[in-house]
Structure formats: structure tokens, C-alpha cells
Amino acid sequence: MTELKGALIGCGFFAVNQMHAWKDVDGAQIIAICDRDPERLKIVGDQFGIERRYSDAAALFADGGFDFVDIATTVQSHRALVEMAAAHKIPAICQKPFAKTLSDAKAMVRACADAGIPLMVHENFRWQTPIQAVKTVLQSGAIGEPFWGRFSFRSGYDVFSGQPYLAEGERFIIEDLGIHTLDIARFILGDVKTLTARTKRVNPKIKGEDVATIMLDHQNGATSIVDVSYATKLGTEPFPETLIEIDGTLGTIRLSQGYRLEVNSAEGTTVSNASPKLLSWASRPWHNIQESVLAIQQHWADRLTAGGETSTSGADNLKTFALVEAAYDSAAHGRTVDIEAMLR
């Protein structure tokens, strides 16, 4: 099998995880990197032995010689870079949040569709081992038809030390973390009809919201709650675990702290350990997220080689992105938002 060659744009905090994961992906490798910051370019280039280094994305695309691009920059540059990839007919992975606005996201999906190239959003939380385990149990039919769920990420972890820019944005937790949790809710319980949200800022040192509670009415009739917080002080810090509760007509699923998966069904109660693997380059407690980065990038390489739409394609991610926009709209105006209307 011919190995795919990729280029990474953006050498910041999280991109290091992506570079580690690319070294473990079967069938793909990164052969060029790009960043406007010469220091970050040197650090990542030296660490991973990448000789082709660029400070300008246009120059990178002009030189070519790669099969896909991994866009790991901040959201302000996403549309321009995705459209640049489309213009050069280079398949693209784009870090979340996908775009600044839903209209931008729609334009990016359209540009790649018109160019006939795959576009995937790096929405990796659904690829975490414990999340996949919950999905597997649900699909087995063990708890019957789900009618209620809760997807919870509550933490007091200092995310600002590693990513100080998160404290500066007018939007914070829904855009940065809630987007993952909302995507998990979609992945587990299906698409959403309507949404109602409330937000709060507890930390006075940041500009955006650090607490959000969101109620979703799913198309299959289930109701779920997505609650996220970076202002919750707990005795045992759960970061970065997403905790899940699912009630079904025949039983329940509970994914609790420490990756404990409990299934109650007509067959009785089973308890298992849904812990992620600790990869050689990973570190606790980040190993859950780091493992999912490898999983989604392997998925991309497999799909790019074999063909077929990715799990988190640009078109699919519009439905997750719409939930983010709807949550901010609902919180700002105190109303329930029709998701289907937003996507028309």
C-alpha cells in the first residue's frame, strides 16, 4: 500500500498530539509543516524530524507534493485554509471549532464538495474508547430504546495555562468543549430537533462563559442534557472524562468517573472497565484525548485510501456546529431554537 503524505498547518499546543499520532498511523505520514511562528515551527520540526518547513500556507500549497492537509490552526484562519485546500484539490482535515459562523462552515463544505475532495473535522471525542463502548452497548439492544440521556463534563482543571488564548475569547466553553460534548450526544442519541441553553461565567478572569447547561430534543424522541463546566471544584478531579447516563426502555447505561461502565438490563448488572490505552507518547490524564486523536486520524487515512465518507465529515459536522450556534442564540435570548430551520 502506498503511504499517504500529509502536511500540517499550525504547530501549536494541541498539534503536538496530532504529530505524535501521525507517527503511529498506518498508511500516512507528515512530510511538511507550516506555522507563522518561527519558534513553534522549529520546535515541532526538530522534535519530529520534518525538513520541509513553511511560514506561509500559500507557499506550502504552491510547492505541493502531499496528499492531504491537516489544519490545526485557531478558528479565525480555518475558512481561508480550507478554501485554499479546495482550490488545490487537496483533501483536508480541519480542527474544531470548524468555523467562526455557520455560514462560513456551509461555505467550506460547499467549496470542498465543488472541488470533489474529502473534508473531515477533527471532532475526536466520539472516538474515545469509553464513548465507543457506550455506543456499542446501546447498539446491542441491551437497554432497549433510549429515551433520556446526560452527557456531562464538569471540571476545575486549569485549561488556560496551556492555552491562554481561551481566556480571551467572548465565547469559551460551548465553542471549545461543549462542541465535543454536543457531538457525543448526537453520536449516541442521534440528530436534534430543538435546543434550549443557559450559560454562566464564574471565573472573573476570563471573557467568555465557563458553565453551560443545554437541553436537547432528539429526532428519535429522546431528551438529553449536555452540561459542561470549568468552574466545578471536586474532591477527585475527573478531567478530561465525559460522564454519560442513558436510560432505555429495558435498562440503563452509566459511564462514571474512572471509566467505570455499568449496564443494567434484563440480564442483570454488568460492570466493566472502559479505560483508554496509555500510548507510548501519551501522559495522564490527557491519554483519553490523545488516544482518540490517533483513532480519528487512522480513520481518516483508512477512508482516504479506501474511499467513503468519514464519520465526522464536514457535511455531518454542520449538524454539530449548528448546535453550538443554537446554544449561544438560546442563552442570549432565552428561547428554544429549531435546529432543522438553522440547517436549511
Image (cartoon, grey):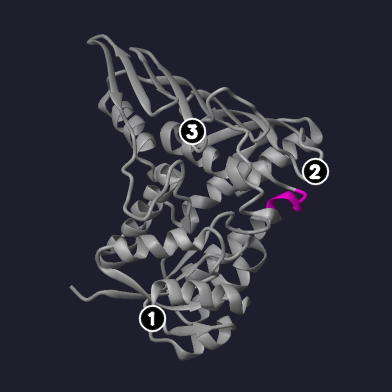
At 50% from the left and 76% from the top, the residue drawn is 85
Q: Give how far across and how far down residue 127 sits, in percent.
A: 38, 45
Magenta stretch: helix, strand or loop mostly? loop
At 50% from the left and 63% from the top, the residue drawn is 15
Can you say which quadrant of the picture contains the N terminus?
bottom left
Q: Residues within 10 Å of mark 1 (few under 14, many from 20)?
A: some
Q: Which residue is mark 2?
A: 205
Q: Residues within 10 Å of mark 2 (few under 14, many from 20)?
A: few
- Above or below: residue 53 compared with residue 234: below
At 33% from the left and 27% from the top, the residue drawn is 138
Which span is picked out in magenta?
166-170
Q: Which residue is mark 1?
A: 66
Q: Residues within 10 Å of mark 3 (few under 14, many from 20)?
A: many
Place residue 269 in its image quadrant: top left
Q: Which residue is mark 3?
A: 242
Q: Earlier in the sequence, mark 1 or mark 2?
A: 1
At 27% from the left and 61% from the top, the residue drawn is 302
